[in-house]
C-alpha cells in the first residue's frame, strides 16, 4: 500500500469540490493507493509530460499523479481540461506536498502499534498522541533517501520515525547513512536541503558532504598520462593522424592540446562530429580554465560549416532531417521502378539511403563511372554493376526531387563548402585544427576540414591533428586517409594503452571486435595494451520481461549510490534508439532519480544526474558505470539478413551493429552492465562468453554491491 502525498493545489481543488465529486475522488484515491493498475481507474501515461500519469474519477474528472517505490504523489485534480492543457502546466521539483490521511491510515497505524506491543510485551501509545514529530525526512522522496544510503526496506521506517533518535535504533541502517541523515537534520547550513530535498542532488551540496563521493567522472575525463602529453605539446606542422584504441585518451589529448596552443596566442579550432561530445569538450575546458578565450573555438563540424557559409558567402539552406530524406528516397525509388526496363533489385529503403549519404555524397562521387569503381570498406571488388546502376538511378531521382522542392540534406553542405573554400581559402586561417573522432567524418568532410589551415601567410607554422579509431566507425562507411586528402605517411602516431577501462571490460570488448573480420582485413584494428586496473567482470543481465530491464537499472543505480561509492553523474544508460532512451528517462523520472537526455539543452556531463544517451551520441565520452540497454535481436543488431544483399554486404551490415555495441562497452571505465531479455538475446553476447558474469533477473531486488 502506497503512502499518499498531496500537493497544495490538489488539496485546494479537493476541498472546494461538490460533495459527490469529492467522495468519488476519495474512492479513486483509495484504489490508486492499493493498485495503480486497477482496471477501473483507466490509468495511462501522459505522453506530453514524462513521468506523469492520469486516471479517471468519473467520465469528466481526472487525477494527475506519479509514484516512486512506496510513495504516491497526487499532483492535480480537475475536469478533462487539465489533460488537454497538461503540457502548459508546471510540475516543479520543489512543489510542496503534505501527507493525505484516509480511513486506511488509522487502521494501518493501529495495526503497527498493536504488533509492536505484542512483540515487546509492553503497552505502546499511538504516536499520534506523542505531540509534534521532529523527523524532517518524513516527506523526503524514497529515491533521495536511497541516495543517502538508506536500504530500500528501511525507507518507509525512516519516513515514519517520529523522532530523530528513532533512526539510531533502526536495525540495518548503515552508520555512514545515519551520520549523513543526522548531519542534514542538525546542520544549519543544510537547512535549504531539508526544506527542498531536490537541493541534495546539486553538486554544490554534495561537495559539502565530505566523503559522499569521489568525483570520479571528472578525474576520469581529465587525467593526462605522460605518453599522452607528448602529443599535447607536439610542435609538428601539417598533418598528424593520432590513432588510438578505445580508452587511450584521444579526447583528453585534444582538450589539453587546444588549451595549450590557445595559451600561446594561436587561433585554435577543436572540432567534433556529435553535439554531445562538443558539449562535453566545452564543459571540461571551462572546468580547467574558465570561459573560453576568443582565440579558441569549440564546435561541431556542421555548426562551423553552416556559420561559415552564412558569414562568408551569405548562403542559407533549407535542410531536411533523416525522416524526410527517406520519404524522398522512397519517392525516388518509385520513379525509377516505373521507368526501369530491367528487373529492379530488391534492396530496402535504408540501404539506398545509407548508400546515397555515406558512399556517394560522402566520397563526393560525381558520375556513374566513378561510382562503379569506388572501393568499399571491407571489399576489394565493387558492388555488382547492376546494383550500382540501380542505386545511381535512385540517387539521380532523389537529387531531382530535392531541387524541385528547393531542399538540401546535410551531406550537400560539405560539397558546397569544399568547393567554395578550395576556390577561396580563408583570409584568416586557423593556426591549429584539432579533430576528435575523425573516423566518423566522410572523406569530403575531412578534406574540407583540412582546408581550414590553408591560406594567409604561407610561412606560418600551422598544424592539423586528427584523432581516430577505425574500430569505432559508426557514422561513415570507411575511407582511406589518402582519399580524404590527408598525407599521413610518416605522420601517424598510435596510442595503444587503454587508460580508461578496467582490464576485465577492455578484454571483453576487444574479444567482441576481434570477430569483425572486415576490420581485421583492413588492418585498422589497434590491439590495445591493457590497463593495470582491475575490476568486476562485465555483467550480462537476462530479464524475463523487457520491462524488467528498466526496473533493474533503476534499482541498481539506487543501490550503488546508496553505498557511497558513486555519485549520480557517474552513471550512463546507453540505448541503441532515441525511443528506448525516452522510456528510460520516463522510468528514472518516475522514481525521482534525476536524469538528463543527451538531446536536452541542459545536458552537462558533470552535473548531478544520470545521463541517458544513444550509443551514437556517447562517442568520445566515458563513465564509471555504464548500463547498455536493449542488447537483443531487433535492436543490436536491428537485422541480420536484409533482402537483396549479397553475403559480403550482409556481413558489412552486421559489422556496423557489432561496432555499435563495442563502442557502448568501451564507454565503461569501471563497471559494465549489458541488459537483455530471455529468448531475445543478441547473438553478439555469445561472442564474449567466458569473459562476462551472467545473472537472471525476474523482478527480485537488485544486488546491493558490485
Image: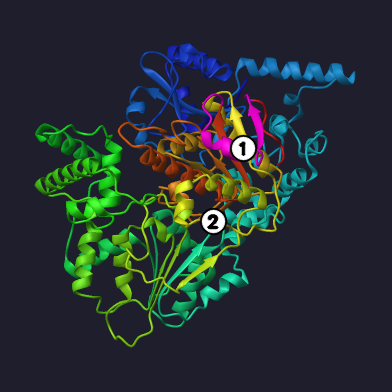
Q: Of tags 1 and 2, which is closer to the observer? A: 2
Q: Measured from the top left, where is residue 257 in percent x and y? A: 49, 73
Q: Secondary structure at mark 1?
A: helix
Q: Measured from the top left, where is residue 471 in percent x and y? A: 48, 53
The circle drawn on residue 129 is none
Q: Residues within 10 Å of mark 1 (few under 14, many from 20)?
A: many
Q: Measured from the top left, where is residue 121 in percent x and y? A: 90, 18
Q: Which scheme is used to colour this image of the protein? A: rainbow
Q: Which residue is mark 1?
A: 143
The circle drawn on residue 246 is 2
> Residue 451's image quarter?
bottom left
- Quadrant containing the C terminus is top right
Q: Measured from the top left, where is residue 704 in percent x and y? A: 71, 37
Residue 690 shown left or right of residue 390 in the figure: right
Confirm whether the magenta stretch covers residue 697. Answer: yes
Confirm whether the magenta stretch covers residue 660. Answer: no
> Residue 34's image quarter?
top right
Q: Residues within 10 Å of mark 2 (few under 14, many from 20)?
A: many
Does residue 454 appear in this view? yes
Of all residues, the one furthest to the right in this rendering is 121
CA distance separating discs 1 and 2: 34 Å
Q: Nearer the viewer, residue 173 or 636?
A: 636
Does residue 145 appear in this view? no
Residue drawn where x is 53% and y is 53% of the image: 607
Q: Secondary structure at mark 2?
A: loop
The magenta segment is 678-699
Residue 533 shown left or right of residue 90 in the figure: right
Amino acid at each position: 500500500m502506497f503512502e499518499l502525498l498531496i500537493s497544495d493545489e490538489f488539496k485546494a481543488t479537493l476541498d472546494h469540490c461538490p460533495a459527490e465529486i469529492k467522495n468519488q475522488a476519495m474512492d479513486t484515491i483509495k484504489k490508486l493507493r492499493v493498485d495503480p493498475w486497477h482496471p477501473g481507474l483507466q490509468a495511462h501515461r501522459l505522453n506530453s509530460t514524462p513521468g506523469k500519469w492520469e486516471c479517471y474519477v468519473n467520465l469528466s474528472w481526472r487525477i494527475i499523479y506519479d509514484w516512486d517505490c512506496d510513495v504516491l504523489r497526487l499532483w492535480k485534480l480537475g475536469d478533462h481540461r487539465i489533460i488537454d492543457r497538461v503540457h502548459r502546466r508546471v510540475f516543479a521539483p520543489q512543489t510542496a506536498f503534505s501527507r493525505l490521511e484516509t480511513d486506511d491510515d488509522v487502521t494501518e497505524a493501529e495495526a503497527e502499534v498493536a504488533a509492536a506491543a505484542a512483540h515487546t510485551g509492553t503497552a505502546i501509545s499511538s504516536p499520534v498522541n506523542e505531540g509534534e514529530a521532529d523527523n524532517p525526512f518524513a516527506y523526503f522522496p524514497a529515491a533521495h533517501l536511497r541516495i543517502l544510503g538508506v536500504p530500500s526496506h528501511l525507507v518507509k521506517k525512516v519516513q515514519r520515525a517520529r523522532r530523530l533518535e528513532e533512526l539510531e535504533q533502526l536495525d540495518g541502517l548503515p552508520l555512514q547513512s545515519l551520520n549523513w541523515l543526522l548531519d542534514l537534520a542538525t546542520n544549519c547550513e543544510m537547512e535549504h536541503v531539508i526544506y527542498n530535498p531536490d537541493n541534495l542532488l546539486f553538486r554544490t551540496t554534495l561537495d559539502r558532504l565530505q566523503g559522499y563521493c569521489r568525483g570520479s567522472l571528472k578525474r576520469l575525463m581529465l587525467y593526462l598520462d605522460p605518453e599522452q602529453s607528448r602529443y599535447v605539446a607536439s610542435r609538428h606542422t601539417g598533418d598528424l593522424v593520432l590513432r588510438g584504441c578505445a580508452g587511450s585518451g584521444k579526447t583528453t589529448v585534444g582538450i589539453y592540446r587546444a588549451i595549450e596552443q590557445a595559451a600561446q596566442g594561436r587561433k585554435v579550432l577543436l572540432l567534433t562530429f556529435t553535439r554531445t561530445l562538443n558539449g562535453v569538450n566545452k564543459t571540461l575546458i571551462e572546468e580547467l580554465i574558465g570561459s573560453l578565450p576568443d582565440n579558441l573555438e569549440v564546435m561541431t563540424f556542421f555548426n562551423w560549416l553552416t556559420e561559415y557559409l552564412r558569414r562568408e558567402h551569405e548562403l542559407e539552406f533549407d535542410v531536411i532531417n533523416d525522416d524526410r530524406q527517406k520519404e524522398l528516397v522512397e519517392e525516388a525509388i518509385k520513379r525509377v521502378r516505373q521507368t526501369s526496363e530491367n528487373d529492379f533489385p530488391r534492396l530496402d529503403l535504408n540501404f539506398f539511403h545509407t548508400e546515397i549519404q555515406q558512399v556517394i555524397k560522402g566520397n563526393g562521387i560525381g558520375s556513374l563511372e566513378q561510382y562503379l569503381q569506388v572501393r568499399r570498406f571491407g571489399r576489394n571488388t565493387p558492388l555488382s554493376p547492376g546494383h550500382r546502376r540501380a542505386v545511381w538511378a535512385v540517387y539521380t531521382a532523389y537529387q531531382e526531387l530535392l531541387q524541385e522542392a528547393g531542399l538540401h540534406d546535410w551531406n550537400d553542405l560539405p560539397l558546397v563548402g569544399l568547393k567554395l573554400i578550395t576556390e577561396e581559402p580563408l583570409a584568416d586561417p586557423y593556426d591549429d585544427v584539432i579533430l576528435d573522432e575523425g573516423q566518423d567524418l566522410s572523406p569530403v568532410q575531412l578534406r574540407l576540414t583540412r582546408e581550414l589551415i590553408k591560406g594567409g601567410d604561407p610561412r606560418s607554422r600551422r598544424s592539423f591533428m586528427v584523432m581516430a579509431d577505425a574500430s569505432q566507425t559508426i557514422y561513415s562507411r570507411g575511407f582511406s586517409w589518402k582519399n580524404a586528402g590527408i598525407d599521413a605517411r610518416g605522420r601517424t602516431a598510435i596510442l595503444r594503452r587503454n587508460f580508461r577501462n578496467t582490464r576485465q571490460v577492455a578484454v571483453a570488448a576487444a574479444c567482441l571486435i576481434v570477430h569483425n573480420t572486415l576490420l581485421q582485413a583492413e588492418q585498422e584494428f589497434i590491439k590495445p595494451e591493457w590497463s593495470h586496473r582491475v575490476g568486476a567482470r562485465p555483467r550480462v543481465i537476462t530479464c524475463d520481461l523487457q520491462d524488467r530491464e528498466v526496473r533493474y537499472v533503476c534499482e541498481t543505480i539506487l543501490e550503488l549510490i546508496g553505498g557511497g561509492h558513486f555519485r549520480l553523474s557517474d552513471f550512463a544508460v546507453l540505448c541503441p534508439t532515441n525511443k528506448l532512451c525516452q522510456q528510460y528517462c520516463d522510468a528514472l523520472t518516475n522514481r525521482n532519480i534525476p536524469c538528463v537526455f543527451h538531446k536536452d539543452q541542459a545536458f552537462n556531463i558533470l552535473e548531478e544526474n544520470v545521463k541517458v544517451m544513444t550509443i551514437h551520441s556517447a562517442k568520445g565520452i566515458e563513465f564509471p558505470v555504464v548500463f547498455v540497454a536493449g542488447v537483443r535481436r531487433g535492436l543490436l543488431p536491428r537485422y541480420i539478413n536484409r533482402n537483396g544483399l549479397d553475403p559480403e554486404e550482409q556481413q558489412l551490415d552486421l559489422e556496423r551493429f557489432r561496432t555499435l555495441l563495442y563502442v557502448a562497452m568501451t564507454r565503461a571505465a569501471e563497471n559494465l552492465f549489458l541488459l537483455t531479455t530471455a529468448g531475445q538475446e543478441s547473438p553478439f553476447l555469445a561472442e564474449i562468453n567466458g569473459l562476462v558474469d551472467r545473472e537472471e533477473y525476474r523482478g527480485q531486488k537488485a544486488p546491493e554491491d558490485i
